Image (cartoon, grey):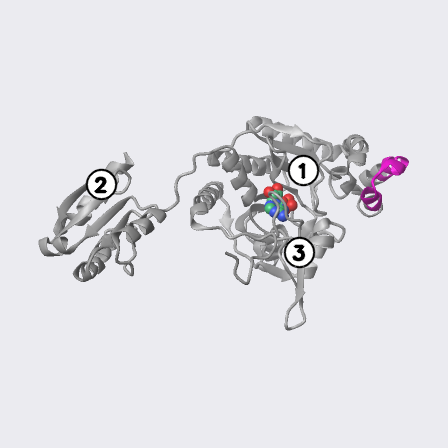
């Protein structure tokens, strides 16, 4: 049935039965990031619009086409965050974290908003888990950041993922790189798509990640031009990143066309691709220039973000056996007025003993209550009827095989504990 309202295009309702995937991802994400020495940061879901246009870049798709920008009642221009790095970098400066011992390592988990064209794996509100490391510029740090991400995916149980990696050089070498690229692309201008012609003038690096068919051959060659024109320092830096990845046992593929959509990247850029679908699960890179753009102290940084919905799709496709989310241990069913009153005490007792307890006290028929128990994926039921009130007892029913036994009130919570333990075996 459709009511008067539907959710906005590109958004989702994530219902209880789907939550086991979310718990699996959030729990593992927190565990892996904490073990790797990252502290969690929560930061606003909206910021000054200029924060994003300055850092992500005016010419990027995100800023040019995809931001949810609005004026608030105070006439400030605000934007729902399309990505996490800009906000975390702003927080780093604003909270004086540059004065703390470096590196500062932060992770986050939360919703991002982009006015993207909704399709499979692409939403307008989607969740990202992300990590940022500030204050260190060393190839081993780039490699380590990639290794942490891979560790997380391994822990989730995902296979068949490929790290694609490239270098786009440092800020110093960027003019030379762009000039070489513009020279090369201009010589083939006639063959380029209209979009690439436009990018050629504004942001030539972005021609490399064009999806247009007619651009493919030239973009492939342009990747080579990029690599050939990296400065000596940038090449050395990149080679070292790759060597460290080898040492860490992280497998990667070079992708000379990988530039990533955002302006703030320098040196290493990378993406994690699900080899079976070709979709990117996440990506990131080094962004040594961002802090200064935001008016902060010159601080090197590297980070990444991964898409939660795409990771869930991948878990489902690979049929990863994800543990059931928190479910109801025991469901208390009552029949008759006196039993209803007794149920209140039994629920309290089981709750205090530490079990998760379900009930539908407002329903009288046993069938209706069992249906709710089933919907809650309850494992046991405690059934209270008139006889149980009279006998000071309760029936414990195993909801998977229907077997049941009667126990005295005083041993009820111990018996529930024993039954649950048996079921776990
Ligand atoms: P990005 O910040 O664009 O590098 O994106 C990092 C990851 O976030 C991507 O690899 C996707 O997994 C995910 N992502 C980006 N945009 C969307 C979107 N519109 N819907 C769902 N996931 C997205």
Establish whether ligand 1 lies closer than 8 Å to the Cβ of label 2.
no
Q: Residue furthest bottom?
A: 74
Q: Are marks 3 and 1 in contact (CB under 8 Å)?
A: no
**Residue position marked by numbered label 2 in the rendering:** 419
Say the numbered circle drawn on residue 245.
none
| Marked residue nearer the N-terminal end (3 or 1) | 1
- Residue 92 in picture, x, y percent from top left: 59, 55
- Residue 143 in picture, x, y percent from top left: 60, 35
| Structural distance between the alpha carbons of marks 1 and 2 | 54 Å
Judge the density around disc 2: few (<14), some (14-19), many (≥20) Cα neighbours within 10 Å.
Answer: some
Identity of the residue drawn at 39% across and 44% down: 325
| Marked residue nearer the N-terminal end (3 or 2) | 3
Judge the density around disc 3: few (<14), some (14-19), many (≥20) Cα neighbours within 10 Å.
Answer: some
Establish whether ligand 1 lies closer than 8 Å to the Cβ of label 3.
no
**Residue position marked by numbered label 1 in the rendering:** 268
| SS type, badge 1 | strand
Magenta span: 182-198
Indicate left or right for 134 with 59 as reference: left
**Residue position marked by numbered label 3 in the rendering:** 296
- Residue 38 in picture, x, y percent from top left: 50, 46
Q: Are marks 3 and 2 in contact (CB under 8 Å)?
A: no
């Amino acid at each position: 049935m459709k009511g008067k309202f539907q959710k906005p295009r590109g958004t989702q309702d994530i219902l209880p039965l789907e939550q086991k995937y979310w718990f699996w991802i959030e729990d593992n994400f927190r565990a892996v990031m904490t073990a790797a020495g990252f502290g969690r940061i929560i930061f606003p879901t909206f910021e000054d619009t200029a924060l994003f246009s300055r850092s992500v870049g005016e010419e990027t798709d995100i800023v040019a086409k995809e931001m949810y920008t609005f004026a608030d009642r105070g006439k400030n221009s605000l934007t729902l965050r399309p990505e996490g790095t800009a906000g975390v970098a702003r927080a780093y400066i604003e909270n004086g974290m540059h004065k703390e011992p470096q590196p500062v390592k932060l992770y986050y988990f939360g919703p991002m908003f982009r006015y993207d064209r909704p399709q499979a794996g692409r939403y307008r509100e989607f969740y990202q888990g992300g990590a940022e490391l500030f204050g260190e510029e060393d190839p081993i740090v780039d490699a380590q950041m990639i290794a942490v991400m891979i560790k997380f995916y391994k822990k989730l149980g995902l296979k068949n993922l490929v790290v694609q990696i490239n270098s786009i050089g440092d800020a110093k070498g960027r003019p030379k790189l762009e000039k070489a690229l513009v020279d090369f692309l201009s010589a083939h201008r006639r063959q380029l798509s209209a979009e690439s012609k436009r990018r050629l003038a504004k942001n030539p690096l972005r021609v490399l990640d064009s999806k247009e068919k007619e651009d493919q051959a030239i973009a492939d060659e342009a990747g080579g031009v990029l690599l050939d024109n990296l400065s000596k320092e940038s090449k050395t830096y990149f080679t070292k990143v790759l060597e460290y990845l080898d040492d860490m046992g992280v497998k990667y593929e070079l992708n000379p066309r990988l530039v990533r959509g955002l302006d703030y990247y320098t040196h290493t850029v990378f993406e994690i691709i699900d080899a079976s679908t070709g979709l990117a699960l996440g990506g990131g890179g080094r962004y040594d220039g961002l802090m200064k753009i935001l008016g902060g102290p010159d601080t090197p940084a590297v980070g990444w973000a991964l898409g939660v919905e795409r990771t869930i799709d991948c878990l489902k496709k690979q049929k990863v056996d994800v543990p059931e989310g928190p479910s109801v241990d025991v469901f208390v069913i009552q029949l008759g007025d006196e039993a209803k009153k007794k149920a209140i005490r039994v629920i309290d007792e089981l709750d205090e003993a530490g079990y998760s307890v379900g009930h539908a006290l407002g329903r009288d028929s046993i069938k209706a209550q069992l249906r709710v128990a089933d919907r809650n994926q309850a494992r046991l039921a405690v059934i209270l009827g008139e006889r149980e009130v009279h006998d000071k007892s309760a029936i414990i029913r195993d909801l998977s095989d229907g077997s049941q036994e009667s126990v005295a009130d005083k041993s009820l919570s111990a018996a529930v504990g024993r039954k649950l333990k048996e079921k776990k075996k």
